[in-house]
Amino acid sequence: MNELTQEIRDLCKEKDALILAHYYVDEKVQDIADYIGDSFYLAKVAKSASCKTIVFCGVTFMGQSANILSPDKTVLMPDLNAVCPMALMVNAEDIQKMRAQYDDLAVVCYINSMAEIKALSDVCVTSSNALNIVKNLPNKNIFFIPDGNLGRYIANMCPEKNVILNPGHCHVHSTITADDVERAFNLHPNAQVLVHPECKEEVCNLADFIGSTKDIIEYSQESDCTDFIICTELGVIHEMKKRSPEKNFYAVNSYQICPNMKKVTLEKIRDCLKYNKGEITVDESLRDLADSPLERMLELGSVPERSLI
Ligand code: 13P
Ligand code: SF4
């Protein structure tokens, strides 16, 4: 263990802190985390972990959700400027307008959203439970926010619902094109194509498997195939390689890096613990409103869901 890692470990002990990290953060940060996972897993850990402090290595909507689900813990973010741009791609007015049009509307809010938007929604979802939750809602009319690509994927899988889409997107996933995938496939013809549902439809159509980061990682481990073309942020490859060192993982373009997730560094983790900085809090009144769609997700989303295609 190097000096910085040791210092972080000592600070965690002193402050009764646990480090939670998303699969898209830098490899060194993944390696120091107590818990690493997809958005759903990390939300569950944030709620149930018994510690005074959580250091959330991810983007701000994740830290906010941890504070909403577990208000008694201190949630520190190593970099408060690590914001997911897609989380800002819907506003309260969009929701109010849609509610005025339909009596029977469920506003289904991807967890990649800010607390103000969650507070106006009926239920939150992540990519690992969205399909299951939407399918089981009693409502026919669903306003899916903010990700238009995940929304379209859910709409295609739930033809019995009227899923209304919002024009939000992830700039990392939506830069991946079918041409990129086909080029990679020509170079690696035995590879399976693993796709996150934040990708465009033309990319989803080429997938052997579509799923959340955790599901994609598990699929790569369990599959008999040895080569995989990765259509998501490339941080997942670190865990894939750990689980299957003999397998090969290929990127499709040079933009598969989330600059916000990569803002988290070991130095910033050390500093937030050492100087008690980067605390993320949501106002109590807003927190109460945003808590119920998140709790509903935990309740409805815990049914295992694999192989989304
Ligand atoms: P999951 O880890 O839930 O698949 O989410 C991907 C993502 O974009 C998080 O910002
Ligand atoms: Fe947001 Fe996309 Fe980065 Fe995920 S990968 S945090 S959706 S910008």
Image (spheres, helix red, strand yellow):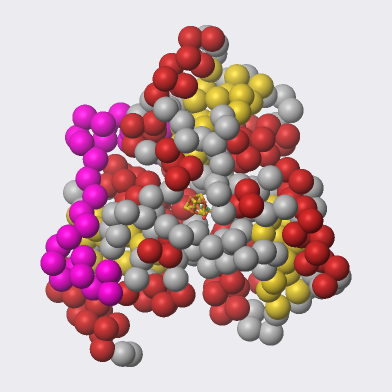
Q: Would you place residue 283 above or below residue 174 in this image?
A: above
Residue 236 location, x and y as percent?
Answer: 56, 67
Task: Look at the image and give the residue range highlighted in magenta.
Answer: 267-295
Q: Is residue 279 left or right of residue 93?
A: left
What residue is drawn where x is 55% and y is 47%? 170
On the question of residue 299 being in view, the answer is no
Name the residue nearer the viewer: 269 or 160. Answer: 269
Residue 215 x %, y %: 61, 58
- Which part of the image, by quadrant, shows the N terminus? bottom left
Identity of the residue drawn at 48% across and 9% down: 100
Q: Is residue 285 visible?
A: yes
Left or right: residue 59 compared with residue 128: left
Residue 65 point in image, percent of width and height: 34, 45
Q: Count all numbered tags in the image, as a single digit.
A: 0
Splitting the image into 4 quarters, where does residue 36 fall? bottom left
Residue 170: within the magenta? no
The residue under the point 55% across, 49% down is: 171
Q: Which of 245 and 233 lies nearest the eye of the viewer?
A: 233
In the shown orientation, is residue 133 left or right of residue 48?
Answer: right
For residue 55, side relative to residue 89 (left or right): left
Q: Main secondary structure of the magenta part?
A: helix
Q: Quadrant of residue 276?
A: bottom left
Q: Nearer the viewer, residue 291 or 263?
A: 263
